Amino acid sequence: MTIPTASSKCVNGVDVDRLLSTIGEAMSATPSLSKLTLRAETEWINGGHTRTKIHSSRGAGIDDASRATPFYLDIDEPLAQLGAHAGPNAVETLLAALGACLAASFVYNAALQEVKIKNLAIGLEGEIDLRGFLGISQRERSGYQCLRLTCRIRSESPRQKLEALWEQAQKHSAVLDIIRNPVPVVFELEA
């Protein structure tokens, strides 16, 4: 994202003019610009410890394959699950991804409607029965059985407007969509 110029309309740190020109003009005129491919590669380190390299993306007319500095995310299991606690575990990372996605969706939609946000925090809590993950019980699912989210916001806008934005954030969150709806997954093994 480019840094907003003095002539740009910036709300909540979002360059609204650029956002509108991207979604309103460019993607409407050329729908292929809306396609985005994200890439990552996970390498096993030891025990439950892995390191994921997030290295490139392609979309919106930009091929970011030459990203100078990739992002790295270390994931491990907590001590109670025989890990070394070298990072959050995978399902904790999912909570972080969901919270970040909902926050971004909220803030971008608020910026488009010129709603100024003073503070936004999303509390996330998930329940897992480890018997499913460990294969002890076939009746318990491996992943979350329930997720609870609480959005705490400070803004001078009326509560009704904030509730509508919270609903919009849920509707447009890519991560929430992935959680709520089955996604085709293609597996391949190279040995």
Image (spheres, helix red, strand yellow):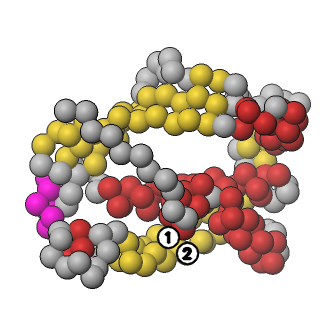
CA gap, disc 1 and disc 2: 5 Å
Q: Residues within 10 Å of mark 2 (few under 14, many from 20)?
A: few
Magenta span: 79-85
Amino acid on which disc 1 is placed:
Gly
Q: In the picture, which quadrant includes the C terminus?
A: top left
Q: Secondary structure at mark 1?
A: strand
Which residue is disc 2 drawn over?
150
Are the two marked residues, 1 and 2, in contact with CB atoms closer than 8 angstroms?
A: yes
The residue drawn where x is 33% and y is 40% is 188
Q: Residue 91: give x, y in percent of width and height.
A: 35, 61
Q: Quadrant of residue 128?
A: bottom left
Which residue is disc 1 drawn over?
123
Give the left or right position of residue 118, taking residue 53 as reference.
right
Q: Residue 148: give x, y in percent of width and height.
A: 48, 77
Instruction: Give above or below for 163 relative to 2.
Output: below
Q: Earlier in the sequence, mark 1 or mark 2?
A: 1
The residue drawn where x is 23% and y is 52% is 76
Q: Residue 38: give x, y in percent of width and height.
A: 52, 36
Give the left or right position of residue 39, taking residue 58 as reference.
left
Q: Residues within 10 Å of mark 1 (few under 14, many from 20)?
A: few
The answer to whether residue 155 is seen in the rendering is no
The residue drawn where x is 69% and y is 64% is 171
